[in-house]
Image (tube, rainbow, N blue to C red):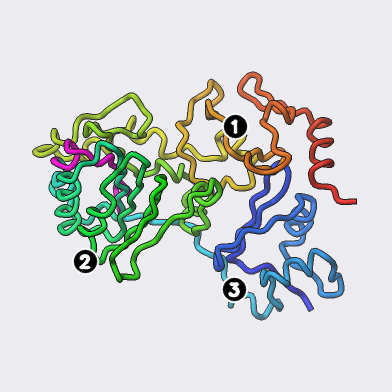
Amino acid sequence: MIYKIFNNVFFTKGFNRTSIYDSLNSNIHFLPNNEYDALAKNNFLIDSIEKNELFDFLFERNLLFEYEDALQSNFPEMNRDIDIPYKIIGCIIFLTDRTSNDLQILNSSINNGSIPQFNFIFTKDTTLESLEKLNDFLCQNEADTIEITFFDDFIYFEQFLLLIKENRKIFIFNNYSEKTIEDPSTHKNRFDNDLGIKNLKISTDLLTYFESSGFNVYYNRKIFIDKDSNIKKALNSDKTYGVLCDFDTAPLVDVINHSDFQEFWKIKKDDTLVCMDCEFKRICVDNRIPENSDSNLWYYNTECDYNPFISKWNDEDGYLSLEESGVSFENNAILANENLLGEINDRLWNVD
């Protein structure tokens, strides 16, 4: 009997290991690179007479099915093309008195409903009046999903939750404060994000996987509005493209269509140093601002929380920085001390 990997299971080869993304169950598993190479070479088919630890590993996780040539048409390849019918997928806004006064422009300058998701950031600059104006905006706007990010200096939790008590939109709460959210709503459309590093950075979402093949999934089709209502292509960017109130009479789409505004949209992880060697690159949501090099490759000035050369997160035992693990940069290229990396990975991962 021949077995085959399901077509909804995707492999991403990294420097140190290969990730397996089971898109049906949103699970992630890992394989040594040599075992992935053997699978790929055999077109992801396994003969039942060759059952071994690899077969057992895949079978126990429901990643295999019995395969016959006659059944091939019943398991077509997944269409990886994505057609996003929006100029802007998401809008990230610091909620202040200034920005709340301009919110209705997002219903007039861009057709109401043409931005499917908003993320409002609440800080010490978020006032009761701005929350009331936000609630008015939410009642009129047709977006299905609203993300709210609370920071520790925000104080009006109870008032905000009472304001949206009857709102039936989907709310996702990111709570960076020390206060517990006690939502008075009885609706089932409230979700709390786990704020662990891995949970926020790694998105086990099929759209993210497909989108990442051609785009930067954090910046692609996003618009950012800071506390002073400045329009930006990234929150940490110094460059602005006007103030939101300027577009009360002018179409905001003019900014969106500007080539410079879209600069980060198509910067793939495959074109970014270090990220190109990471097994998470197809499901990673990274808010760092990419920098350009002379070789058409991109890089980040800050180090990621994950080191793909030793397969360790910075909160795990055995973590080392890139420099400590023998990884350096020269002439826009990565130089890896393979002997040192081999010793480190043997110590971390080989079990006697």
Residue 32: x %, y % from top left: 77, 52
The three-letter code of the residue at mark 1 reads Leu
Q: Which residues are magenta?
A: 86-101
Mark 3, other Cα within 10 Å: few <14 / some 14–19 / many ≥20: few
Please identify the residue farthest to the right as the structure is shown: 352
Q: Residue 20's quadrant in the figure?
A: bottom right
C-alpha gap between disc 2 and disc 1? 47 Å
Q: Which residue: 79% across, 79% down?
A: 1
Q: Please say whether residue 334 is one of the residues in the magenta stretch.
A: no
Rendered location of residue 77, percent (x, y): 57, 66
Q: Which element is circle 1 on? A: loop
- Residue at image position (57%, 31%) is 303
Viewer-closest of 239 and 168:
168
Q: Is residue 77 left or right of residue 95?
A: right
In the image, 85: left or right of 113?
right
The answer to which of 288 and 133 lies nearer the viewer is 133
Q: Nearer the viewer, mark 3 or mark 1?
A: 1
320 relative to 13, above or below: above
Which residue is rendered at x = 72% and y = 63% of the image? 44
- Judging by the rendered image, the residue that carries numbered circle 3 is 75
- Dot label at residue 166: 2
Residue 273, label in figure: 1
* Residue 97 sits above or below residue 71 on the image: above
Closest to the observer: 330 or 73?
Answer: 330
